[in-house]
Image (spheres, helix red, strand yellow):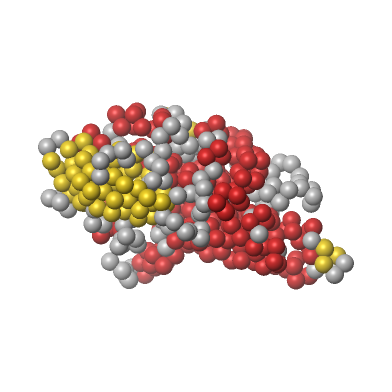
Amino acid sequence: MTADHAVDSQGPLTEALGTDFFSVRRRFTEAQWDTFMSVRRYVDRVVSPAAPAAWDAAEMPWEVIKGLPDLGIVGDDIAGYGCPGFDPLTCGLVAMELARGDGSLATFHAVQSGLAMKSIAMLGSEEQKQEFLPAMARLELVGAFGLTEPEHGSDSVALETTARRDGDDWVIDGRKRWIGNGSIAGRTVVWARDVETRAVLGFLVDTTSPGYEGSVIPRKGSMRSVWQADIRLDGVRVPERDRLPGAESFKDTGRVLATTRGTCAWMALGHATAGYDAALRYALERQQFGKPLAGMQIVQERLVQMLAELTGMQLYCMQIAKLAEDDDLAPTIAGLAKMNNTRKARWVLAHARDLLGGNGILLDNHVMRHMADIESIHTFEGTETIQTLIVGREITGHSAFT
């Protein structure tokens, strides 16, 4: 998807080239275009230049993160409470652009806006929405989403974290793993099983509560500048007022997850776009055998194949945005889009890394970082295997898992 200004071949590697080969931009409204361009400028000028050092150091780029509220994008499609109330296409464009600059930043935003805030918006009381959402939209309060456990990832429905009622409080015990923002959040949405009814409930846990401990998972080779945490909950007391009243079963957990699966398809598109941009830029500038790499037939063939996959990913994303706007985006469709786009993004990025030769492994050339980061999206919000089995069940009527 192209910017409205041309970028000559001497521009910085981080600045986006045109990739809108099928002219999907024509379907944008002016408001969508303005938001898209606002985020694109921020990514080109601020996010991408800062990303390699933050990734290398495994440090969260706080100065970059603090700029998100000024863009008016935190809260995605939530209406009111200081949130932008975006339509599905605008939400997707924002996710794509953030991922094009830095997958870690896009993941931070997805956890804040798409998991933590969405849980409150969809399942919380009016009092909870008034108390938490405005502060979260301003990033005065960071949120996290605590579902995955050390022994339960794809089968998260089997979660073992427990909640028992004790007077006006609930007492929560258990472990969570791979919880984005879990070590820095002020509130973590914790999913736990009621020991009496066995129903899965949601709680807005104050992370300063005794018994809550979040520790950063070290030595990651992907999404290094966003922190995922191991969480211990040892007798954490949560008042009844901090239970999400709309969360009465795991189906309600699934409703939140279903809204974010399409976001993964858009994020994968952003990573692939970054890889294609870098490969094309490099091919135009790099001289070998007395001419630019871009003048060689085999390089042109590979760039065209990359563009073909990228264009297909765009069309997937545009269609799921249209279906979401019509309130007709089934979880299986979002899952198929996520599966397809993460798979294609991995392919595009592998070719981009190869086209850059030895320079492809340098963080300053961006491709290696995106190549590593796409591995996280390939896994979270449902692995390719699980998405395949969900769609397979839909088209055959037979379930290959329970």
Q: Residue at x 70, y 67 (%)?
A: 357
Based on the displayed image, in which of its 4 quarters is residue 355 positioned?
bottom right
275 up-or-down from 123: above or below: below
Location of residue 93 in the rendering, given as x and y in whole percent from the top left corner: 56, 45
352 up-or-down from 3: above or below: below
Q: Residue at x 87, y 67 (%)?
A: 290
Location of residue 49 in the rendering, given as x and y in whole percent from the top left corner: 65, 46
Based on the displayed image, in which of its 4 quarters is residue 354 positioned?
bottom right
Q: Residue at x 31, y 32 (%)?
A: 128
131 up-or-down from 327: above or below: above
Q: Quick one: which residue is furthest to the right in this view? A: 290
Q: Residue at x 59, y 57 (%)?
A: 369
Give the tally of numbered discs: 0
Which residue is nearer to you in this view: 89 or 349?
349
Left or right position of 196 against 184 = left
Which residue is nearer to you in this view: 263 or 201?
201
Location of residue 196 in the rendering, given as x and y in whole percent from the top left corner: 12, 50
Query: Would residue 29 be seen by someone viewing this image from the given angle?
Result: no
Location of residue 92 in the rendering, given as x and y in whole percent from the top left corner: 52, 46
Query: Would residue 42 be seen by someone viewing this image from the given angle?
Result: yes
